[in-house]
Amino acid sequence: MARAVREVVRPDGLNLLQCNGEAAAQSVLHFHVHVLPRHHGDGAPLNWSLVPGDRDEIGALAGRIAEAIDRDGA
C-alpha cells in the first residue's frame, strides 16, 4: 500500500501510523494502519514534537523491552 501511494502521489515522505487505545486517539476499535502521504510544509503535524531523549534512559528501556520479548517469546 505504501509503495503504491508513494508511486501515485509522489509525496516527499510517508507516515505509517497505528493508534492503539483511546489515549492514543484510536477511533476504530480494530487494527488498521493509516498511510499518510506527506509534503514539506503540508501543515499536517503529528501530535508530538521531536525532542532528544536521555540516551541512558532509552538504552535501559530498550533492554527491559528486549527482556520482555525474550521472556514472553514474542
Image: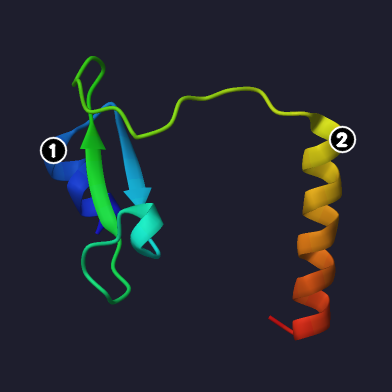
Q: Residue at x 34, y 42 (%)?
A: 15
Q: 52 above or below 26?
A: above
Q: Is residue 28 above or below residue 58?
A: below
> Looking at the picture, which amino acid does disc 1 mark?
Val
51 to 27, vertically: above or below: above
- Name the residue located 40 percent from the left edge and 64 percent from the top edge: 20
Farthest residue to the top: give it. 41
Tell me the CA gap for discs 1 and 2: 40 Å
Q: Residues within 10 Å of mark 1 (few under 14, many from 20)?
A: few
Residue 51 placement (x, y as % from top left): 58, 23
Q: How is the image coloured?
A: rainbow
For the residue marked with disc 2, what is the amino acid? Asp
Per the image, label 2 sits on a secondary structure element best described as helix
**Within the image, what quadrant is residue 10 found in?**
top left
Within-10-Å neighbours for mark 2: few <14, some 14–19, many 20+:
few
Residue at (22, 28) in percent of width and height: 44
Number of the label disc, if any, that sits on residue 43: none
Mark yes or no: residue 18 visible: no
Residue 5 can be seen in this image: yes
Residue appearing at x 24%, y 43% in the figure:
36
Q: Earlier in the sequence, mark 1 or mark 2?
A: 1
In the displayed structure, does residue 28 sit left or right of residue 20?
Answer: left
User: Residue 18 location, x and y as percent?
Assistant: 36, 58
Residue with the most extreme front position: 23
**Residue position marked by numbered label 2 in the rendering:** 56
Could you tell me which quadrant the N terminus lies in?
bottom left
Q: Is residue 49 above or below residue 18?
A: above
The residue tagged 1 is: 9
Image position, residue 72 (x, y; %): 75, 84
Along the viewing direction, whichever of 54 and 22 lies nearer the viewer? 22
Which mark is nearer the camera, 1 or 2?
2
